[in-house]
Amino acid sequence: MDWLFAGLILIALFFLVVVFVPLIYFSIKYRKGSRADRSNPSAGSDLLETGWTAFPTLVGIGIFGWGAIIYFHQQNPPADAMQIQVVGKQWMWKFQHAEGAREINELHIPTGRPVVLTMTSQDVIHDVFVPAFRVKQDVLPGKYTTEWFCPTKPGIYPLFCAEYCGTLHARMGGRVVVMEPAEYERWLSSGPPRLSLAAAGERVYRELGCSGCHDQQGTVRAPPLTNLFGRTVALQSGEVVVANEQYLRDSILLPGTQIVAGYENLMPSFQGRISEEEIMEIIAYVKSLSERKSP
Ligand code: CUA
């Protein structure tokens, strides 16, 4: 990212020189009253025109290719990345670790391990921006977006909200605390004992009565959840979708929109009855029932 940025600055500097040096030179040479030769104005040059079309085109395609490589790298977190769930709201960030630890406006992570944030918003659009990690991603209500990085150096790095979200937008932020792995393990076990995300999810799953239909014995009415995550699912509409986080979320809140082939539209929506955190917990539970950890 830094090299790309430096490259763009260098290219901009190059064109600055190409434009302004001749501009100043000709302004002086052809100033009013100078005795410069004004006969035989040039009618055009094929070489020059081809050159100034071809060269910037190649430079442009080069920048596009370079940026695309970085973009794809950024959009595809490694499969073994550490998972952190993030919920943004006016005006704070809530983080949840897979082991169950919860934090507000502060995120503790170890060095040397890729970390992927799965993020959503409880109200308006926010954006998680950690300048030191060169990552920035919008956080949207009703949708999961992700952002990943691999911290290499212990330290404290500021975290900002980078999308105007109301009165206290400027103060919505916090810090990322990067620690040595052993220190991180100590931090993780120092808090109050917590259910893991998946175990908390299983509790919500039972409390809301999901188990009545989705457990193995009830699977005539509802599709089983074992080994569902990461698999492809055939829908009644003929469409085939991948059971990723977004699919599970939509199935909980908008169950009528994607009916699995062979089942009836029986499930009520849980919109308003379940919090963003609880949805993330249930997803972690469904993930724990599957061998695949990423779609
Ligand atoms: Cu949240 Cu700006």
Image (tube, helix red, strand yellow):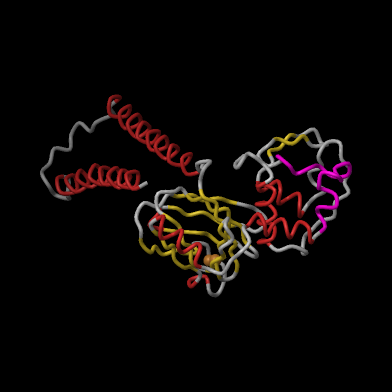
Q: Residue furthest left?
A: 35
The quarter of the picture where residue 289 lies is top right
Q: Position of residue 106 (x, y in %)?
A: 48, 66
The residue lying at 38 percent from left, 32 percent from top is 57
Q: Residue at x 46, y 48 (%)?
A: 114
Q: Is residue 69 left or right of residue 227?
A: left
Magenta extent: 209-227
Ligand number 1: quarter of image: bottom right
| Residue nearest the viewer, comparing 74 with 94 | 94
Q: Is residue 26 above or below residue 86?
A: above
User: Where does the image place residue 220, in percent across and percent down from the top left?
Assistant: 88, 41
Report the predominant secondary structure element of the magenta stretch: loop
The C terminus - image quarter: top right
Residue 148 appears left or right of 249: left
Where, by quadrant of the figure, is residue 25 drawn?
A: top left
> Hey, which residue is sitting farthest top in the picture?
46
Kindly identify the residue that appears in the image at 85 percent across and 52 percent down.
212
195 and 13: which is toward the camera: 195
Residue 232 appears at what percent x and percent y? Answer: 70, 35
In the rendered image, residue 12, in percent from the top left (x then y), is placed at 30, 46
Query: Is 242 in front, or is 166?
Result: 242
The residue nearer to you, when weighing 247 against 219, is 219
Residue 65 colored magenta? Answer: no
| Drawn side of residue 12 relative to residue 242, left or right | left
How many numbered badges does the structure rendering display? Answer: 0
Residue drawn at point x = 56 percent, y = 65 percent: 102
